[in-house]
Amino acid sequence: MRKIVCLFLVLFCMLGTLPAIAQEQPGEGDISREAAAERALSFFEETFGFSRLEWPTEAKEARFAPGLMQDGQTMENCWFIVLKNEMPMNALAQVHSKTGEIVCWGCDGEKNLTDLYAAIPGLAHQHFYHALPESGEWLNPKALYDRACADFSYHSDISMSVLASDCTVDISYGNTDYIGFLPEVERENERAIQFFFVAQVPAPAREDNLEISDPVDRWTYTVAYSLPDGEILSQELTMNYAPQPLRSNPLKQ
């Protein structure tokens, strides 16, 4: 549950709507806001290959607060730095307050800093947890996306054509011992990719929506695949926020 809470914290922070939380104050041994912002900017500049001289970038928001560390449990203070420029870029870095380590980072999928997921429709956000893919070819994101859609369709009985037109997706990539993957994952230090789908689907007639005009059901599906072998590490299905059972698959994943 802590991992999921931290994931939503990341999303809210990226959108500039981070809710009020009990903030700490930097103390002895903590790096300054300016140093954390510089660390985040240097990281994105190096990782994504843009020049701050060509695209001046500034920290639009900086929060100093507890953040989950790589074991998914330990709470230690971090700087949460939101960077924006006219590229346009909208990116978040979580910077460890003592070491300056980039614990996790993410960016707005509509303003991609990478082309790793360019072929994926409905992309809302992308996150990277302490790792980048070796290459787009190694990651093969479109094939994994198609598989995730097929798995979503299989478990929910929603047709692939409906999902293709009424779905948004968040994609997370990184090490399984960092945040971003479902909590039952026990394997550590493994690369994985996670898809989080949201689909608004016309609802069938039933007692709880007979009086609603044009009712819809909100379906979500989260699935994490190990890389490079493609094993399903974890998955979860909900309808209108209520957990739904997963169908058994006669074929070994």
Image (tube, grey):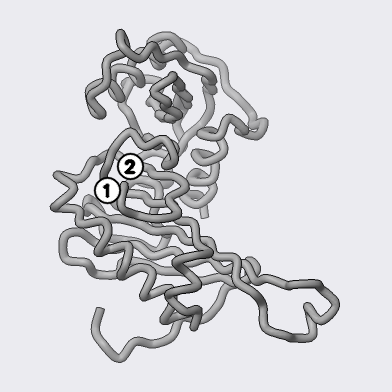
The local crowd at label 1, few if under 14, some if 14 to 19, many if 20 or more residues have their Cα within 10 Å, is many
Location of residue 97 in the rendering, given as x and y in whole percent from the top left corner = 41, 21
Location of residue 112 in the rendering, given as x and y in whole percent from the top left corner = 36, 37
Disc 2 element: strand
Q: Residue 238's image quarter?
A: bottom right
The amino acid type of the residue labelled 2 equals: Tyr
Direction from residue 27 to residue 69 in the image, left or right: left
Location of residue 78 in the rendering, given as x and y in whole percent from the top left corner = 45, 26
Residue tagged 2: 129
Residue tagged 1: 175
Residue pictured at 46% horizontal, 50% vertical: 3
Q: Residue 251's image quarter?
A: bottom left
Tag 1 near tag 2, CB within 8 Å: yes
- Residue ranking furthest to the bottom: 250
Disc 1 element: strand
The amino acid type of the residue labelled 1 equals: Asn
Location of residue 115 in the rendering, given as x and y in whole percent from the top left corner = 27, 41
Q: Between residue 120 and residue 240, name the one nearer to us.
A: 120
Real-space Cα separation, disc 1 to disc 2, in angstroms: 6 Å
Residue pictured at 38% horizontal, 65% vertical: 223
Q: Between residue 78 and residue 38, name the one nearer to us.
A: 38
Direction from residue 111 to residue 131 in the image, left or right: left
